[in-house]
Amino acid sequence: MTVQIKQALRQMGPNLILFSLAVAALGLTSGIHETSFNNYLYDTFEIGASARGILEFPRELPGLLAAVLAGALIAFGLVRAAIWSMVFLAAGLFGLGFLSVSFPVMVVWMVIWSIGNHVFMPLEGSIAVSLAGERKVGQVLGQLGSIRLAATLVGAAVIWVGMGNFLVDNLTYQHTYLIAALVAAVGVIILLRIPNVRPSEKRQNRIVWKKQYWVFYVLCLLWGVRKQIFITFALWQLVQTFGQPASVIAGLWIITSLIGVFFRPYLGKLSDTFGERAILLAEVPITMLIFTGYALAPSLGVDGVGLYFMYSCYVLDSVMTATPLVRTSYVSKILNNKNDLAPTLAMGVSLDHITAMIMPAIGGFVWAMFGAHFLFLGAAAFLLLHAWTAWRATIPRTPQSQEAAA
């Protein structure tokens, strides 16, 4: 095993190893931040569901503007842009822990963190491809993905151990955000050791909007709504209604991530075997049951049966969030121009973030006015629109589409 690891590191080369460490630093900060943020908001500012929903608008806004923000920084080179994104991320995390003297100030630091996080997303793949050289690009991307996931699990473990009952003196939110900020700062130092990578002069940044891709566009818009039920309101149900601490959220995060490592390749095989439309349609009744479970769980008791039922729904929901890879597979097979893939996927991300910013505010209002159960049941009914769209996700057997898919 040691020999295999040494061979893998030798094949990657020094610059790619350094970049892998930087990606690991980002993954570790994500594991710490994402598993504690909802508890941090609830414990520190005592906000309700409505305010939590509205907060997603500024939090997701940098995701909508990621292409513009990254494009402005790329003028300095890919690695330099990544350095700036990591600086923003470190500053935002430090500000959340030590400088958020009020809720509005906290929002500012949250946005700074979000800018760094969302700008790094499109840069990660570009830098990896540039540093891969003659190595297999898919293999390199897969290695980086595994490294990031492993680091995320370590970050979640920090919260699980440090904020659980495993230590005499539990970590505070200041401690955890300081750790995350320091790790991000280490990431900056690592990136400074990598030679800058300039984007190709032949690269053309363009926007693709074609009516024949409308099913993909609508699926992305609907995904923005669906994912917020999972990342915002399901977590808020666990924190506010069931009173679960950050350590429990981190433990669930670890469980769902471990399941995801094995499930995602299997989902890809299912998509190849039965077709993308079949998987997209099968997703609907399963997710409807999950959302209905969220609505019914409190009635079974906030501890005991109800709590473990909520845990089960959340874990299954996390498994189902792997389905974006099916949408990517689908759109790659309907292209009438193989060069449309990257800009079309980028358009999908922007559309996803449009609804991801709007839906939490609406959902938070519904929660506050009518109750959490009404929100989750309404989301379950909303999935019928997803079924209608998925039914139209057919793959035309034309020479153009077959050439694009190839």
Image (cartoon, grey):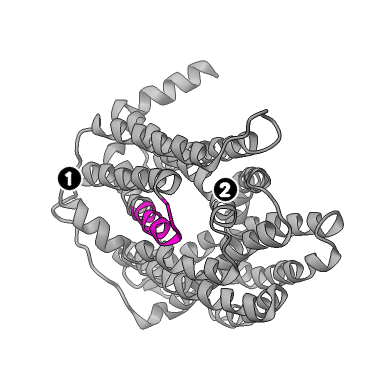
Amino acid type for the residue under numbered disc 1: Arg
Q: Nearer the viewer, residue 151 or 129?
A: 151
Q: Relative to 81, does residue 281 appear above or below in the rendering? A: below
Tell me the distance, in whole angstroms, between the alpha carbons under discs 2 and 1: 35 Å
Chain-order first, disc 2 or disc 1: 2
Q: Residue at x 36, y 46 (%)?
A: 89
Quadrant into which the C terminus falls: bottom left
Q: Residues within 10 Å of mark 1 (few under 14, many from 20)?
A: some
Where's residue 401, x and y in %?
40, 71
Where's residue 100, x and y in %?
42, 51
Query: With 244 as the anchor, is 187 left or right in this view?
Result: left
Q: Relative to 273, does residue 170 appear above or below in the rendering? A: above
Q: Nearer the viewer, residue 42 or 203?
A: 42
Q: Residue at x 37, y 66 (%)?
A: 61
Query: With 205 as the anchor, is 21 left or right in this view?
Result: right
Q: Which residue is mark 1?
A: 198
Q: Where on the picture, by quarter, is residue 305?
A: bottom right
Q: Where on the picture, by quarter, is residue 186?
A: top left
Check contact, mark 2 vs mark 1: CB within 8 A: no
Tell me the SS state at disc 1: loop
Quadrant into which the N terminus falls: top right
- Which numbered dot is residue 35? 2
- Whether 104 is among the magenta residues is yes
Tell me the SS state at disc 2: helix
Where's residue 127, x and y in %?
29, 43
Q: Which residues, given as a range, are shown in magenta?
A: 100-115
- Whether 288 is among the magenta residues is no
**Residue 178 visible to the viewer:** yes
Amino acid type for the residue under numbered disc 2: Thr
Q: Nearer the viewer, residue 292 or 172?
A: 172
**Residue 396 visible to the viewer:** no
Residue sitting farthest toward the left: 201
